[in-house]
């Protein structure tokens, strides 16, 4: 019975590690790396290649991946098209079409076609290796309750042994039991053995198995947790804060317009007409902004640079950069080709309106710029960036759109999870309110610098009590993510700093996994509490009757091992999708019963009509 029970325990425990094993099976041992010519480009005419161990693949290598093969490391498609699946990585069931220029995570499986891929990361930094590494580390990082049970189990086991010896040696003197036992009365040694079996902490030891199971369940959905303690922390949170750009919105800002608003207008002495100081000042402003943002990863900078591509813009020389995180940047413009400023050195600054006005020499100038922004002919509903060159300010208008399905996520967190939902953003009020109204967030804090977000997270956690969840993705969110009870990031977009300080990584490029994380944490903590209660109940129910001589030793073993198996079975429930309440569970069971019943009725109806049809 002991052996059978332990075999069953090992089986249920291994269920929690299945997902990691499946991921490891996607490891390709070696890859086909194409030979490159003098220009460091692959020779696609004869496709000469060599086999290279996957751990030795370098960034910039060109890899040949055929149908049915796995992508070894994170890559970019250089040539060819194919249908790929990343279901085992992110839970995304729908196959994806990969074409030239698309980025593919390591571990993706090629379903058809043949592609030449350019490696963008080494094996150690690739998505597949990171998933496996983080999942294994998470299963080793024990939560507080598990560490306490481990320490308690050591002391508890010693107490059980001492009590068993005491019953065996002292029982005959205190209770007049026989030492060996007779057909009439069980002996003290028999009773002591029963206590030692019944009270052993096996069931308590496997009670935290639900944590490992939940971590695997989350990994199956493309959610990586950095330890079981994250589940406890999530379950204790009452507030959740979202960054706006790139988190609630797509982050792919679209350039809408560029508008000179201050310092550009002059009055003619002869005609008294107001005209722009430079006929092509909008082009020059765009050229300066694109030059300052070249190579940036910030959404606003990317939108400006992308819009400038293909435009007939003057050449701009920029140097002496200075970056102010979450606010903007300054630089020196050495010259603008075809510009009226000739070879003059010009001071340029690009960033938020508040950043530009903070650099003004007088309060009057700052006030006039703000008034000009408010009086903009394009309104206040867009995302704004301001460019100041030689005290001439140009307003850049960009549009940011909410991610699909975000409003449903917010509604679920408010209605089912009962969380206080807020937005923390560095954008100005009009843009923040537009997105907040679209997604259903009522509490908005805007124009926040990174240190303001950090202070807001700390003060909210302190004033409201309970924990706070911060969801973001940019480097300016890193301080707030680190200070929050739980930090959640979108791994595909997040900066390295944000990933390093975050507790949860969402591999899918959306926030649909946030409600699942919260529900899974509550489900897991509930299961662990149930496991502890079941383990203690089994120990008590088996120990007292054994000491009193009511239970034979074989039945004590059965009760003890049965309790351990019940705890294991209860832990495996963490593999199921969580629900918000027992009412939802009951409704789900009713719906399943109705669907199965309707299927059976249709089968019976078909079987009854077949004889008539044959006649």
Image: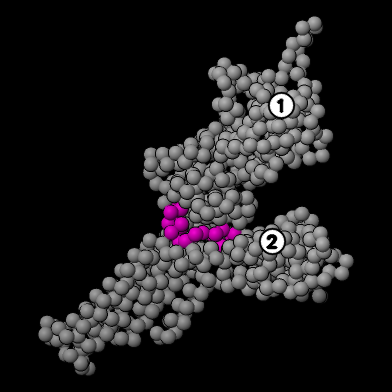
Q: Are marks 1 and 2 in contact (CB under 8 Å)?
A: no
Counting labels gives 2
Q: Quadrant where the C terminus lies?
A: bottom right
Residue bearing mark 1: 344
* Residue 325 occupies quadrant: top right
The answer to whether any part of residue 169 appears in the image is yes
> Measured from the top left, where is residue 213 in percent x and y?
50, 67
Residue for point 66% across, 60% down: 121
> Measured from the top left, where is residue 320 in percent x and y?
63, 37
* Residue 18 occupies quadrant: bottom right
> Measured from the top left, where is residue 405 in percent x and y?
63, 46
231 drawn magenta: yes
Mark 2 crowdedness (10 Å alpha carbons): few <14, some 14-19, many ≥20:
some
Residue bearing mark 2: 59
Q: What secondary structure is marked by label 1?
A: loop
Residue for point 25% across, 80% down: 161
In front of the other: label 1 or label 2?
1
> Measured from the top left, where is residue 498 in percent x and y?
54, 50
Residue for point 21% across, 78% down: 163
Q: Is residue 231 left or right of residue 23?
A: left
Q: Is residue 327 above or below residue 140?
A: above
Q: Which residues are magenta?
A: 216-235
Q: What secondary structure is marked by label 2?
A: loop
Choose between 68 and 602: the one closer to the eye: 68
Q: In 3D space, how far apart are the residues under numbered discs 1 and 2 (Cα atoms)?
A: 42 Å
The answer to whether any part of residue 81 appears in the image is no
């Amino acid at each position: 019975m002991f052996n059978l029970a332990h075999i069953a325990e090992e089986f249920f425990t291994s269920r929690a590690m299945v997902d990691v094993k499946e991921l490891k099976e996607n490891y390709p041992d070696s890859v086909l790396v194409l030979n490159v010519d003098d220009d460091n480009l692959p020779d696609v005419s004869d496709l000469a290649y060599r086999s290279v161990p996957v751990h030795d693949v370098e960034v910039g290598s060109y890899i040949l991946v055929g149908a049915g093969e796995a992508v070894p490391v994170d890559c970019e498609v250089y040539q060819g098209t194919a249908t790929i699946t990343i279901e085992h990585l992110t839970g995304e069931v729908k196959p994806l079409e990969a074409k030239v220029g698309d980025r593919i995570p390591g571990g993706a499986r090629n379903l058809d076609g043949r592609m030449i891929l350019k490696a963008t990361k080494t094996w150690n930094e690739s998505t597949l290796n990171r998933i496996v590494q983080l999942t294994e580390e998470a299963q080793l990082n024990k939560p507080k309750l598990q560490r306490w049970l481990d320490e308690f189990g050591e002391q508890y086991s010693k107490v059980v042994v001492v009590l068993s010896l005491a019953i065996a040696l002292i029982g005959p003197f205190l209770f007049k039991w026989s030492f060996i036992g007779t057909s009439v009365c069980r002996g003290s040694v028999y009773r002591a053995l029963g206590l030692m079996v019944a009270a052993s902490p096996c069931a308590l030891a496997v009670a935290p198995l639900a944590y490992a199971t939940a971590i695997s369940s989350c990994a199956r959905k493309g959610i990586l947790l950095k330890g079981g303690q994250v589940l406890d922390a999530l379950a204790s949170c009452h507030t959740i804060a979202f960054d706006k750009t790139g988190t609630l919105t797509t982050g792919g800002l679209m350039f809408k317009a560029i508008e000179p608003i201050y310092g550009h207008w002059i009055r003619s002495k002869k005609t008294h007409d107001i005209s722009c100081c430079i006929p092509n000042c909008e082009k020059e402003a765009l050229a300066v902004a694109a030059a300052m943002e070249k190579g940036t990863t910030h959404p606003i900078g990317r939108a400006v640079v992308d819009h400038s591509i293909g435009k007939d813009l003057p050449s701009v020389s920029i140097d002496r950069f200075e970056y102010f995180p979450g606010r903007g940047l300054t630089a020196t413009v050495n010259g603008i080709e075809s510009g009226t400023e000739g070879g003059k050195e010009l001071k340029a600054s690009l960033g938020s309106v508040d950043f530009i006005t903070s650099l003004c020499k007088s309060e009057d100038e700052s006030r006039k710029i703000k008034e000009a922004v408010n009086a903009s002919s394009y309104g206040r509903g867009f995302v704004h960036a301001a460019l100041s060159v030689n005290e001439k300010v140009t307003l850049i208008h960009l549009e940011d759109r909410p991610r699909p399905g975000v409003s449903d996520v917010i509604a679920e967190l408010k209605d089912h999870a009962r969380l206080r939902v807020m937005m923390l953003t560095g954008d100005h009020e009009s843009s923040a309110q537009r997105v907040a109204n679209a997604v259903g967030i009522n509490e908005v804090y805007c124009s926040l610098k990174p240190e303001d977000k950090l202070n807001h997270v700390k003060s909210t956690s302190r004033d409201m009590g309970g924990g706070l969840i911060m969801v973001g993705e940019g480097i300016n969110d890193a301080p707030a993510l680190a200070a929050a009870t739980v930090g959640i990031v979108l791994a595909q977009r997040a900066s390295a700093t944000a990933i390093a300080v975050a507790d949860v990584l969402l591999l899918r490029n959306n926030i649909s996994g946030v409600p699942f994380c919260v529900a899974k944490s509550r489900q897991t903590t509930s299961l662990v509490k149930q496991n502890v209660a079941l383990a203690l109940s089994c120990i008590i129910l088996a120990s007292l009757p054994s000491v009193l001589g009511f239970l034979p030793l074989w039945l004590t073993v059965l009760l003890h091992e049965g309790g351990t198996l019940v705890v294991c079975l209860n832990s495996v429930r963490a593999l199921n999708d969580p629900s918000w309440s027992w009412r939802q569970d009951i409704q789900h069971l009713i719906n399943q019963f109705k669907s199965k019943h309707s299927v059976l009725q249709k089968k019976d109806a078909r079987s009854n009509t077949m004889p008539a049809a044959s006649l």
